[in-house]
Image (cartoon, grey):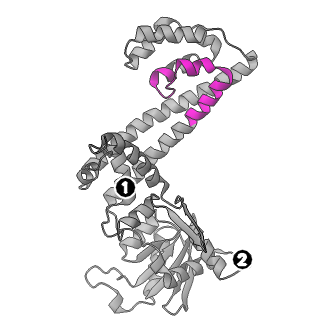
Amino acid sequence: MLFVGDDWAEDHHDVEVQDDQGRRLGRARLPEGIAGLTRLHELIAEHLTDDDVDPETGFVAQSVVIGIETDRGTWVSALVGAGYQVFPLNPVQVARYRERHGASGAKSDRGDAHVLAEIVRLDRAHHRPMAGDSPAVEGLKMVARVHQSAIWDRTRHLQRLRSALREFFPAALEAFPELAASDALELLERAPDPARAARLSRSKITAALARAHRRGPEAKAEAIQAVLRAPALRLAPEIEAAYAAIVASHVRLITGLNSEIASLQAVVAEGFGRHPDADIVTSQPGLGPILGARVLAEFGDDHTRYTDAKARKNYAGTSPITRASGTRRVVLARYARNKHLADATHQWAFCALTASEGVG
């Protein structure tokens, strides 16, 4: 077998090829793209025999093992398509392995390629190979992650907006308890400071509530106007103007994110609905098209990837870890996990409480 360490950078790859005894057979710096990948195939082919090549497809058989610190991108996809065994290694684990073999702290791209080759040659049994997920679920994972990240971004901007309003315009928080709602954003963009908010007419407030499909917009508009016009402590005009600019900026960002989140949600739901495992996933209490898409995308559809249910729980971070030494034993939460999947399973647990018929 051949073992290849691939230390990748934005525009090049440092690779090292070893045999099963650890002898270095080749080393090179390759450019990113087709030219570099072609040279890598040639470098590997120099040390392969005819028995290592599939006569029907021409692909290299699974006698080449490659270690690389990523599981995404066209380069990795091409390596998998060529028939190589690809091990996407965690950079933290690679750093720890490097420290095992040298205490000087020296580091180089060529040295990292050597470490990666050593890991897949000697320690690959303790690492997970590249999952054999379908292109459909890989695409779904990309869109679902961007959708999830956009929601996290919106939450951060909402927290900043709430913090700014609490500092100079707390009445807005009382008037608009749902800051992400379209009516609250519309009115805050129109009146981002106490002076302009106090001048908002009831008809404008009512119209914004009606566009947001609120029930009883007239009564709600009267209550909002009363809150905005109530006497309150004020800051200096210059400070209020600065805060108003900050509020308006956050409002525009949140409005844009709301639009993009809705668009991405439609794409996620459509992609999930086309997947053959969608019905199985949504049969679980608490999983709908969006949360189910996240769970499916992060777990993948390679049914041989996980050895048992415990392996799935470890990957999701839902199984605890135990640290025992002598008479001391501590059980802790698992923080080394897939954060996207952990967030999805956390929401799944709470949704199941209300969606499961078995919960009384």
Q: Which residue is mark 2?
A: 106
Instruction: Please indicate whether residue 121 sits to the left or right of residue 212 in the image.
Output: right
Judging from the image, what secondary structure is the residue with disc 2 in? loop
| Vertical comparison of 149 with 321: above or below | above
Residue 249: x, y in percent? Answer: 60, 29
Q: Main secondary structure of the magenta part?
A: helix
**Which region is colored magenta?**
157-185
Which residue type carries mark 1?
Answer: Ala
| Vertical comparison of 127 with 299: above or below | below
How many neighbours does mark 1 have within 10 angstroms: few (below 14), some (14-19), or many (20 or more)? many
Q: Quadrant of the N terminus?
A: bottom left
Mark in the foreground, 2 or 1: 1
Question: Residue 112, located in which quarter of the rendered image?
Answer: bottom right
Viewer-side residue, 140 vs 53: 140
Q: Which residue is mark 1?
A: 297
Q: Residue at x 64, y 20 (%)?
A: 169
Q: Quadrant of the C terminus?
A: top left
Judging from the image, what secondary structure is the residue with disc 1 in? helix
